[in-house]
Image (cartoon, rainbow, N blue to C red):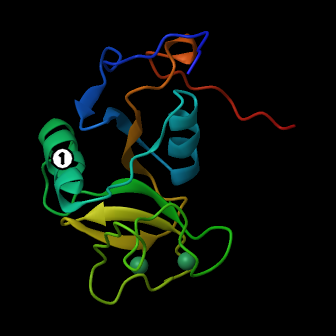
Amino acid sequence: MASNYLLAEICPPDWHRYGESCYFIITVEMDWFEANRTSAESRAIIAIPNSQSEENYIYRELFQKNVDQTQGAELWIGCNDIEEEGKWQHCPLKGETNGYENWVVGEPNNHNGADCMHIWNDQWDDTICYYSKYAICERHVSTPVSTTIAHLVTRPLKND
Ligand SMILES: [Ca+2]
Ligand SMILES: [Ca+2]
């Protein structure tokens, strides 16, 4: 493939590599939408675990060891059913190829209109998107260098 940009085969400073992904820990709590926007500004998404091993890395290795060791510590995940109730987007759900699912028994329950997913106690739950929680950004290791933003920059919402 002809390319006019270089591919980064390593993760930028302050990012952590696992498999084919780079991860960045957002060390302040924010609502799901702001975490989503913050990730997007680094050409990333809110991290989504596609396997138990990746989930263990994201939640235990990166989040709990570096940010919050308390039991039941809560971490945003990129899955959501904001657009259509019950239709979870960007989740590696069972029934799909290479599906993976790790809901708490009885979840998701859409309690009070819960549309965003978080991990607590090593399992998934749907909760209110406007709550403040930590998040981790994820992007593929070969994200083009030319568009790399090595450090997260928070910008105000554009109203256009
Ligand atoms: Ca919901
Ligand atoms: Ca729930």
Q: Measured from the top left, where is residue 68 in percent x and y?
A: 19, 45
Q: Give the number of callouts.
A: 1
Foreground: 32 or 97?
97
Q: Quadrant of the C terminus?
A: top right
* Residue 158 drawn above or below residue 117: above
Q: Residue at x 35, y 70 (%)?
A: 99
Determine the secondary structure under disc 1. helix
* Residue 134 drawn above or below residue 123: above
Q: Residue at x 58, y 77 (%)?
A: 87
Circle 1: residue type: Tyr
Looking at the image, the residue that sits furthest to the right is: 160
For label 1, the crowd category at 10 Å Cα-Cα, with few meaning under 14, some 14 to 19 and many 20 or more, is some
Q: Measured from the top left, where is residue 159 in percent x and y?
A: 83, 38
As drawn, is 73 to the left or to the right of 33?
A: left
Task: Give the residue number, with chain letter if any, for mark 1.
Answer: 57
Q: Residue at x 32, y 73 (%)?
A: 101
As drawn, is 61 to the left or to the right of 144?
A: left
Foreground: 152 or 5?
5
Q: Quadrant of the N terminus?
A: top right
Ligand 2 is found in the corner quadrant, namely: bottom left
* Residue 95 drawn above or below residue 52: below
Q: Residue at x 38, y 45 (%)?
A: 135
